[in-house]
């Protein structure tokens, strides 16, 4: 059940710039279809991106868009985030995973503020949506049909790992 009192307010107000690492982080989930593109032929990419550096700092790929995979990505963020003297705000859209009790409580346990886009306002989370579009274009996703989950997931993982290395300067 979703409790309105735990939902994050839209606190970034489309102010995506910051001068502090890990102060503002955005997250989103995107669906990728393969084969006949039926309900069972989909995988989901969830990522977290630091707005200071523009780097994707974690991602998960899963068969279903479940909260546990979003939480897994959040735990990866916590693992790489150094101890800092200021709080972190994570901004997302309003999909069910980010409204779940488990997600909201986990953010609170780690003293992370939650910010959510306003309804029907895609620009509020545009900073996180662009990597999905770029990936889909570069993987020729819009014109090529991947016939198996593995055939789609492997280039997605390769693309993500290359982007993470390039953004972090460890290539």
Image (spheres, grey):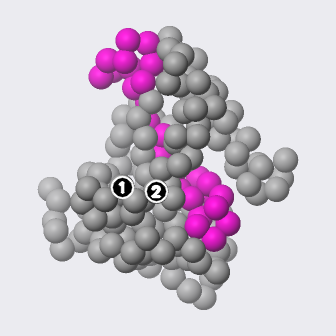
Q: Residue 31, percent across and down?
A: 41, 35
Residue denoted by label 2: 126
161 above or below 97? above
Q: How many numbered discs, if any?
A: 2
Disc 1 to disc 2, C-alpha distance = 6 Å
142 above or below 84? above
Q: Nearer the viewer, residue 29 or 85?
A: 29
Residue furthest out toward the bottom: 85
Q: Are marks 1 and 2 in contact (CB under 8 Å)?
A: yes
- Residue 168 is tagged as none
43 above or below 93? above
Q: Is residue 56 magenta?
A: yes
Q: Residue 159, percent across and down?
A: 67, 36
Residue shown at the point (63%, 80%) measured from the top left: 20
Q: Residues within 10 Å of mark 1 (few under 14, many from 20)?
A: few
Q: Is residue 41 left or right of residue 139?
A: left
Residue shown at the point (61%, 27%) measured from the top left: 139
Residue shown at the point (33%, 72%) measured from the top left: 10
Q: Nearer the viewer, residue 101 or 31?
A: 31
Residue range corresponding to the magenta coloring: 33-58
**Element on which disc 2 rests:** helix
Is residue 163 visible to the viewer in this orientation of the structure? yes
Residue denoted by label 1: 122
Q: Residue 83, percent across and down?
A: 64, 79
Q: Is residue 87 left or right of residue 5?
A: right
Quadrant assignment for the N terminus: bottom left
């Amino acid at each position: 059940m979703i409790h309105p009192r735990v939902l994050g307010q839209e606190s970034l107000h489309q102010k995506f710039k910051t001068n502090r690492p890990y102060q503002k982080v955005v997250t989103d989930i995107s669906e990728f279809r393969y084969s006949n593109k039926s309900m069972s032929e989909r995988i989901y990419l969830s990522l977290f991106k630091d707005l200071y550096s523009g780097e994707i700092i974690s991602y998960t790929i899963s068969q279903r868009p479940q909260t546990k995979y979003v939480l897994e990505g959040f735990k990866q963020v916590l693992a790489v985030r150094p101890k800092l003297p200021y709080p972190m705000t994570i901004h997302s859209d309003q999909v069910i995973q980010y409204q779940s009790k488990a997600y909201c409580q986990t953010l609170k346990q780690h003293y992370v503020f939650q910010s959510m886009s306003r309804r029907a306002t895609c620009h509020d989370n545009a900073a996180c949506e662009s990597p999905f579009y770029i990936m889909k274009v570069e993987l020729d996703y819009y014109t090529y049909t991947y016939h198996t989950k593995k055939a789609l997931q492997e280039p997605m993982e390769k693309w993500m790992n290359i982007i993470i290395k390039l953004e972090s300067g460890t290539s």
